[in-house]
Amino acid sequence: MTVGLESRLGGSAVNNGECKDNGAEFFAKGIFKKDNPTRALCKTIIHFWKDQRILRVNKRKATVEMDLKSQTVSASPRLIIHGGAGNIRPMSPQKYAQYRDALLNIITKTNAYMTTPVSLKQEARSSRTGCPSALDIATYAVELLENNPLFNSGHGAVFTRDGINELEASVMVSSGFAKRGVGVTGLRRVKNPILLARKMLEHGEGDLRGKADLGWASRDEAGENLDIPSAQGHTLVHGPSAELLATKYGLDLVEPNYFFTQTRWDEHVRALEREKSEHQVHTESWATATWSADEFLPQGTCGAVALDADGVICCATSTGGMTNKLTGRIGDTPSMGAGFWAEQWEEDGTPTMSPSRRATPPWTAWREYLGAQSPVVELSTQLKSMVAQCLPTPFIYQPVAQDQRLVTTRSAGLSGTGNGDSFLRVAAVRTVVGIARWTGVSTAEALKRVAGRNGELQRSAGDRWGKTGEGEGGMIGIEAVVVRDAASGDIVDIRHEILQDFNCGGMFRAWIDEHDHAVVRIFDGIKDGDYAVHG
């Protein structure tokens, strides 16, 4: 087994992924060799630095990765996906297993893709690792969701009242692209709308500078000549124009019947009939063909949020819209700020760092941590020297002094799902990031205030809550934080967090946790446990 130690601390020589420093090599091997007498101590040290969020252990590759002092931060890629939220009702164990297996398959495939280096010819790769970028990762996951008829996007899209499939999609990045985010809507023939949104974002670099083929034009389905040289500076493009852009980009177009599934058609017909019968019996009925208290009618989206090694966050979202929406209706999914948002900003200090992390020097914390593992821990001079070669020392990793001026770079990206009209009314996703940015609270706390129980979304429904589907929904996201010393630029703290919250019956979701494990949830976790027992 080849044991590698990757370090940007400057304390060890690294060549082609193999550590050439004897002390560091000894330490790295000590983690994985069972017969090494210092293995227990090495593992204890590993656990401490993992807690400090500056060291990662990859057991599959038997490598230890540290990144602390470098001016260029290498983040740990993270991923979360969702398949819609709303009035999700209790289901049979077989149905639950069907959703669970689909989400698990998609998150696992995307995780494998996320951690595999790609060709250097692929422009969107991460510059730090050569692995796929956040844009690559998020759109890859959503494309898989679009191809699965269980979820309300692409092949599983719902029908309008007129029995038509009209699709929408969007992407946005926290940094790295001039347009930052785009949306497409009113699509009837684009097989994978998320790929069209991605192409618009990527071509935006040239479009905003007037670098477009002005001689290109084509006919839409009605035979009308449309002059569509590019997406130009537009953020949102609809219908025939958007589909002609898909043709220009070389994306797959399909016949409208590709989007037909019997399940969605039956939901469409059943809901229209229920709406009609309810109003015939009860003139004051709240019944609509878009929502039911007794049946889950998809009104949400599919989405993914990814963080890459460069620290860029991308959110990608796709949907068929609300069941039995009006033909031509535009929802929150392609509307920037309502159904999706990603942003990066800087702020003085570190308002989201806990006081304990701010006040305890890491070297002191290490000693306390070691002391907590056993009654007495005393390192020999030789062992101290060996450890110092491998790990950050007090002279490398400076504690946060009380008078030290800190600068924090924060990034957040979120994808929303649920009743899109409610998301539009409160600019839901941008509101979350706005709260986090302008009040200094964590994005998780901001998310709770908007999409959590009794949050802004729920309150927006007023007395219609629980009667029309208004206000229902949830969001997934990622927040990344890098804290630096303002004077030296040294990194003081690195952390990132998977985000999720919802106020309704459930939200189909899956993510890769900090231990590199795939996790799937539909309900609140407790109910999911019941299915795990009885399924």
Image (tube, rainbow, N blue to C red):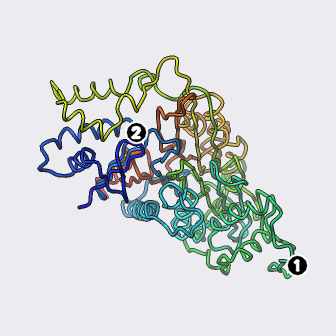
Image quarter where the C terminus lies is bottom left
Locate residue 520, reporting x and y percent: 41, 54
Query: Of discs 1 and 2, which sits in the foreground?
Result: 2
Q: Is residue 39 left or right of residue 223?
A: left
Task: Of the two numbered discs 1 and 2 on the same chain, state the one appearing first in sequence.
Answer: 2
Q: Is residue 438 above or below residue 160?
A: above
Q: Is residue 363 left or right of residue 445?
A: left
Q: Secondary structure at mark 2?
A: loop
Residue type marked 1: Asn
Q: Is residue 487 above or below residue 102?
A: above
Q: Quadrant of residue 67?
A: top left
- What residue does disc 1 label? 225
Q: Is residue 264 above or below residue 447?
A: below
Residue in the image at 66% along x and 61% along y: 169
Q: Is residue 88 left or right of residue 414?
A: left
| Residue 529 visible in image | no
Q: Secondary structure at mark 1?
A: strand
- What residue does disc 2 label? 53
Residue type marked 2: Arg
Q: Is residue 375 left or right of residue 216?
A: left
Residue in the image at 59% along x and 51% along y: 417
Q: Are marks 1 and 2 in contact (CB under 8 Å)?
A: no
Residue in the image at 41% along x and 31% along y: 397
Locate residue 372, reporting x and y percent: 23, 27
